Image (cartoon, coloured by chain):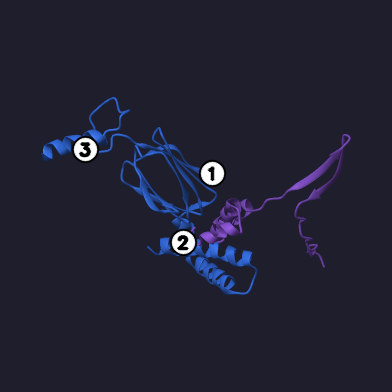
Amino acid sequence: MSSATWRNVFTYNKYAQIAARALRQSLKENERVAAEKRGVTILRYQQWENGQGGQQVYLNPPEETNPKKSAAV
Amino acid sequence: MSALRLLSSAARRAPAAFATGRRGYADVADKLKLSLVLPHQALFTSADVVQVNIPAATGDMGILANHVPSIEALRPGVVEVLDSTNTSKKWFVSSGFATVHPNNKLTINAIEAAPLEDFSAEAVRANLAEAQKVAAGSGSEEDKMEARIELDLYEALQHALGR
């Protein structure tokens, strides 16, 4: 908290998340893998109108993963 | 004269709500009930401890039993817990709040915390160098501020691991 000027830019929540992420990245390898999962948040939302649900939209769309190469050649 | 002063200071030291009377100067009759909780894990749940040292943003503090109720924001640093057998356990916490409640309860909330053995010194060194580069670089104000926050944490972590 010594660089207290972050208050002009971030909320406390953002500050806490940044610090938590930094801590997770400093762990030893096996703990880090478990910890990184805790840092992931996924949000999907859906607009409802007249009892009908609309399209489910990701807040942050997941990145397209490349299709895995098959073992058989 | 000195005897009178000793008597009045002893009377001031005993809390008013303490009905059972005598309390030695050296020993601690009351225990602190510590709850050290993270969102994913409760490290302590109302455990009886003697002293907890916390890295408050306003400075390092030691909390004993019968502490005045207070709320302290924590900076990245080491929380040390001393139980009745005088063994000390340390966790590095990322940030959070320590709240002393009136009935001898201490609650520490943090998002992430881990014992010092779980950290890798090389990872900290690499992250520190990376954060220094971003903080001194030409990115946006937010990126630099983010790097500065991370820098604080890595420096505190290095200091904790170094000792």
* Rendered shade, chain B: blue
User: What numbered label is drawn on residue B157?
Assistant: 2
Q: Element under label 2?
A: helix
Res B76 seen here: yes
Label 1: chain?
B
Position in image of residue B30 (x %, y %): 32, 34
Amino acid type for the residue under numbered disc 3: Ser
Of B16 and A47, nearer the camera is: B16
What is chain A's hue in the picture?
A: purple
Q: Nearer the viewer, mark 2 or mark 1?
A: 2
What is the C-alpha distance between the residues marked 2 and 1? 21 Å
Disc ID at residue B9: 3
- Between label 2 and label 3, give the one nearer the viewer: 3
Q: Nearer the viewer, residue A66 or A71?
A: A66
Query: What crowding class fits label 2: few (fewer than 14 Cα within 10 Å), some (14-19), or many (20 or more)?
Result: many
Which callout, 2 or 3, points at the residue further toward the start of the chain? 3
Q: Residue at x 50, y 69 (%)?
A: B125
Kind of residue sitting beneath label 1: Gln
Residue A68 horizontal side relative to residue A27, left or right: right
